Amino acid sequence: MINFVIKEDKSGQIIDQVKRVVTVITSVVLIVYIVVAAGVIGWMVWENSRAKKTTVDTSDVIKQIQDLSAKEIVIRNLADRANLVESFLGERGDSSQSAYLLGSPGNKIVSWNYVLGGAEVVSVAASQPAELKVYMDYLGEKYVQVRTEKVEWTPENGWKGIFDVTRKKGAT
């Protein structure tokens, strides 16, 4: 017996099913790959833009700090200079008042060394030693302490007295 019935060829259907499965799987893998790649690229773009913004903000803050630092230096220098002027004005002496106190009619002041708050040294020329004594008494009325350093006579200048005076009377 011979069977003359043609067998159905199912190999074409199996190949079509395999092709369909392979196409679906590769399409899903491709879609997943594209979505992941788009996500990674999007994440990198977002991070890059955030880093650029942070860099710009940081450079702006650094520039502001540098500007403020320069202003602070100028302000501190001005404050230091103002303090120096204030301390000078507060500590300067009144040499004109001291000069007025040292001046006496009839006596010639040869030299005067003024020191704020310290001992002043005055050198006086006179024609007689008695004039030096009168001048020393005059200084005693104006100053707390008067000390005679030296009295000398020279042929070219005559009598000369050197006196140390300390602290004006009435001054604190």
Image (cartoon, helix red, strand yellow):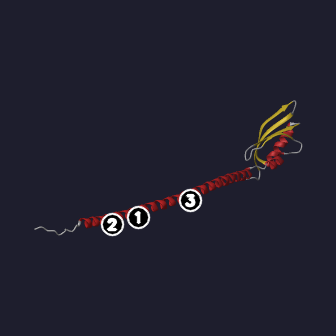
Q: Position of residue 134 (x, y in %)?
A: 85, 42
For mark 2, give the secondary structure: helix
In the picture of the structure, the residue carrying the numbered disc 1 is 35
Earlier residue among tags 2 and 1: 2
58 and 67: which is toward the camera: 58
For mark 1, give the secondary structure: helix
Q: Position of residue 171 (x, y in %)?
A: 75, 52
Kindly identify the amino acid type of the residue bearing the numbered disc 1.
Val
Q: Position of residue 36 (x, y in %)?
A: 40, 62
In the picture of the structure, the residue carrying the numbered disc 2 is 24
Which residue does the image show at 81% across and 45% down from the upper left? 139
Query: How many residues crowd mark 1 within 10 Å: few (<14), some (14–19), many (20+)?
Result: few
Which residue does the image show at 69% across and 53% down from the upper left? 78
In the picture of the structure, the residue carrying the numbered disc 3 is 57
Query: How many residues crowd mark 2 within 10 Å: few (<14), some (14–19), many (20+)?
Result: few
Is 42 placed above or below 89 here?
below
Q: CA distance from mark 2 to mark 1?
A: 16 Å
In which quadrant of the rendered view does residue 7 lie?
bottom left
Is 66 placed above or below 107 here?
below
Kindly identify the amino acid type of the residue bearing the numbered disc 2.
Val
Earlier residue among tags 2 and 3: 2
Earlier residue among tags 1 and 3: 1
Kindly identify the amino acid type of the residue bearing the numbered disc 3.
Asp
Is 93 placed above or below 51 here?
above
Question: Residues at badges 2 and 1 in contact (C-beta under 8 Å)?
Answer: no
**Image quadrant where one finds the N terminus:** bottom left
41 and 11: which is toward the camera: 11
